Amino acid sequence: MARVGYIGLGLMGSGMARNLMKAGHELVVHNRSRAIVDEFASEGATPAFSPREVAQQVDFVFTNLPDSPDVETVALGPDGILEGVHDGLILIDNSTIKPATARKIAAAFEAAGAMALDAPVSGGDIGARAGTLSIMVGGPKEAFDKTLPLFEAMGKTITWVGESGAGQTAKAANQIVVAGTMVAMCEALVLAQKSGVDPERVVDAISRGAAQCWALDTKPDKLFKRDHAPGFKAYMQAKDLKIVVDTARTFNVSIPLTAVAHQLYEAMIAMGNGELDNSAVITVLEALANVEVG
């Protein structure tokens, strides 16, 4: 069994870290909020007080943080992981960040004699707890092969996509589809409601045909109950879509549908609903149509 560090024990990270513990790995944990660290310590993990302290004690260190600047600070900043680097250390970042940031971090670790993988995930908090995530990985194939047993404790679909930054590019593509299908599903429900047709029966009618998708499989029941508790918070969806838009601009790629989806999530934040589930983008569409589904 490996000695593993995990930094960032939020909605996703806590489930993933617990699955590493369930698989028998020794865990060293750090988080900005200490309450969750104390909780993990009570379950058998070793607490640490800085990213550097985590790195000094482990062979693999995972990070799961909100955005590119957070990952860069934890990896490369004062008292960061790089300050605790040692031969053979592998950094695995499960955050969703800019591909360019992933490549910058990987280069810094390579120069220090270590390796880094960008390994964003998809599947939400449900997948994080159940260990059924899809994990898309960029970075040295050697590091991927060494880390694979750890990935297998957290996910079911694990793909080495290519060199550093490739995992984050795959996640950007993933978020294009996730946001697009989520918005489309919500538009369909609003159209049905406004037309006087039972949205639940519409879901029954279309959910096993060509319209079948993850959003339609998992979200309607919550929406019909007006349950907007987060699995994946809307403000994080907006953040991910900004990464997509910025990356597309870098490579001169036109993504008009994604740009509209990004604006709808930004509108949701402006309405004060950024902490709700990303499926609650339906509230923006309901406001535009002057109707309420459910």
Image (cartoon, rainbow, N blue to C red):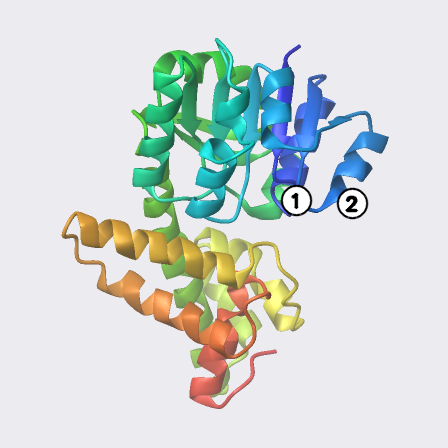
Amino acid type, mark 1: Arg
Pick the quarter of the image with the C terminus.
bottom right
- Residue 153 appears anywhere in the view: no
Query: Residue 91, image x and y in percent?
Result: 49, 24
| Res. 219 mark | none
Q: Residue at x 58, y 22 (%)?
A: 55
Query: Residue 263, image x and y in percent?
Result: 36, 71
Q: CA distance from mark 1 to mark 2?
A: 9 Å
Using the image, determine if residue 182 lies above or below residue 88.
Answer: below
Q: Which residue is the site of mark 2?
A: 35
Q: Secondary structure at mark 1?
A: loop
Res 220 quadrant in image? bottom right
Amino acid type, mark 2: Ala
The front one of 265 and 57 is 57
- Residue 249 appears anywhere in the view: yes
Query: Residue 63, image x and y in percent?
Result: 54, 34
Q: Secondary structure at mark 2?
A: helix
The front one of 69 and 116 is 69
The front one of 228 and 222 is 228
Res 289 quadrant in image? bottom left
Q: Residue at x 66, y 25 (%)?
A: 20
Q: Which residue is the site of mark 1?
A: 32
* Residue that protrudes farthest toward the front in the picture: 78
Using the image, determine if residue 5 lies above or below residue 287.
Answer: above
The crowding category of the residue bearing disc 1, from other C-alpha atoms within 10 Å (few below 14, some 14 to 19, many at least 20), is: few
